[in-house]
Image (cartoon, helix red, strand yellow):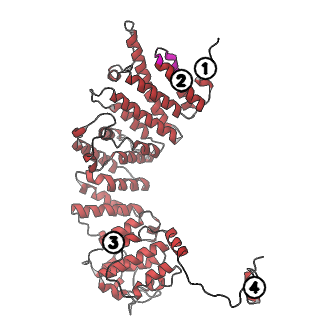
Amino acid sequence: MSLPFVPKLSQISSGKTASKLLKKKATEFLACTRETSTLVEILDYYKECLARKAPITPCLLTLEYLFTQLFVRADIRPADIDAQPTFVPSVKDPQANHRQWLLAQYQETCGLVIDGMHHEKESEACQALATAMKLLAVQCLQQPEADRFPVAGLKQILTTMLSLECLNKHLFNRFLEYSSYLDVIFYCWKTVPSLVPRNCPPSEVFKQNFLLLLDAIIFGKDKLKEADSALCVPLGDSFDYAYVRKQINRTWGFVMNWQHSEVVHEQLLILLLEKVFVHLDKPVLVTDFLMDSLDVGGTVSVLALQGVFVLIQQHNLTYPNIYEKLYSMFEPEIFHTKFKARLFYLADIFLSSSHLPEGLVAAFVKRLARLALIAPPQDIVIILRFVGNLILRHPALKRLIFHPTGGEASSDPYIMEERDPMKSKALESSLWELAALQNHVLPSVASAARFISNPLPSVEWDLSEVLEINENDIFHKEIVSKTKEFFVNIDRPTGMFGYCGGQLASQYWKLF
């Protein structure tokens, strides 16, 4: 009886058939590792899939399973990886030759798996990253007494993710699964400073990838209080935070000296505010960077303002022109940025003191009132609540409500173009803008503007309730609100396009 024909991997396309055949080939090789042609065939098929950009997940999972079993069975010993970097056959010891050959195949496989991270399909590239990290883990877990992390393999993975041409956000999102381990964090920071290019300025894509890497491996100090979690090498109490902090400061010094586009600048400030500040040895050293960022405009200025606020609040920084900078940020463009809620939140904090000059606060009130005339409806509500709170904090500003000599739209003494709020003549003006908003087409906006015509409340409005509202919220609120029914016709109409009370009216309602 003849044996069943088993096709070669190169003779079939990728799919379920290829997955079943790969599993069968891996089982055959593990049953007899002397059949070296089987492993060579699997690797050749993987190379072919890479070359024609076909799905590589079945090959990756097969190689991951195959080499995991070889490590578990001690057919490959991690201690030999650094001891014998190249395959040199020996006539005297065939078994050692075979072990060295397996080791050489493992090293080639690691390189091929990392090459798979360049795959144009994101899911395939992420699977290549996962397989590469799992191979690192199994390599360490089989030699717990050595207590050595495979730093060289980790550096190769990080270098691949830091592409010069392709933004690898999907890879860094997947890497978050592994950067939660303390040993990965520690050895990443041991490697990261060496990844910064020194001879030439990095490309914009590299900068974004590098900041994504920093975002993935920078941790909060509460992380050190958690139970020890390790991918490869348990660190326990030996996690050297002082060393990691030194590496963070060193790396941040390189990053700060780059030339930043608006996208990178914004990404850099978010990372600084959310994760880096707590690790800096001397936070005041970023003062000049934040001051320069305040002049950029847009979202960059808003984020820099938050950084300045942190320095003022926590590190006693004095900045005499901060209110002029804050005043200049309230431009029509701010309503179309994603950080406008943050600007209002910070402005509310900066203007919370009741000891500020009335002329300064009046300038903010007038500027906001003027912007309310051209702002989207959801932002008008925020402005009205903010202005109302400022008037409650400074009762003398009630004079702005229907100021008897404050002028009107055609003769307002307030100078909108003046950059110095104290010279804007805001105290000589009136809030005619809010009176005009009482006739707004949206009832919610008109109702919010009527606070100047009614007795002011004794407590401030909660600004947080309106900071995140959008146009959909306003639309939904108007749709579900109950309104009274009004009669708009003396005679009940008999049809949609019928006679509507006269010749003139009928011709405007006729559509066909």
* Quarter-of-image position of residue 290: bottom left
Query: Percent from the top left, x then y, of residue 500?
Result: 73, 86
Q: Check residue 224 in the rendering and tell me which mark sits there, or answer none.
A: none
Q: Earlier in the sequence, mark 2 or mark 3?
A: 2
Contact (Cβ within 8 Å) of mark 3 with mark 1: no
Query: Percent from the top left, x then y, of residue 381?
Result: 44, 75
Q: Earlier in the sequence, mark 2 or mark 4?
A: 2
What's the residue type where badge 1 is placed? Val
Find disc 3 in the rendering and name its residue: 348
Q: CA distance from mark 1 to mark 4?
A: 83 Å
Find disc 1 in the rendering and name its residue: 6
Find disc 4 in the rendering and name its residue: 506
Q: CA distance from mark 3 to mark 1?
A: 74 Å
Q: CA distance from mark 2 to mark 3?
A: 67 Å
Q: Is 235 or 315 nearer to us in this picture? A: 235
Q: Is residue 270 magenta?
A: no
Q: Is residue 41 magenta?
A: yes
Badge 3 density bin: few <14, some 14–19, many ≥20, Cα 10 Å:
some
What's the residue type where badge 3 is placed? Asp
Left or right: 496 in relation to 338: right
Find disc 2 in the rendering and name its residue: 24
Name the residue furthest bottom: 404
Badge 2 density bin: few <14, some 14–19, many ≥20, Cα 10 Å:
few
Look at 29% across and 82% down and name the residue there: 394
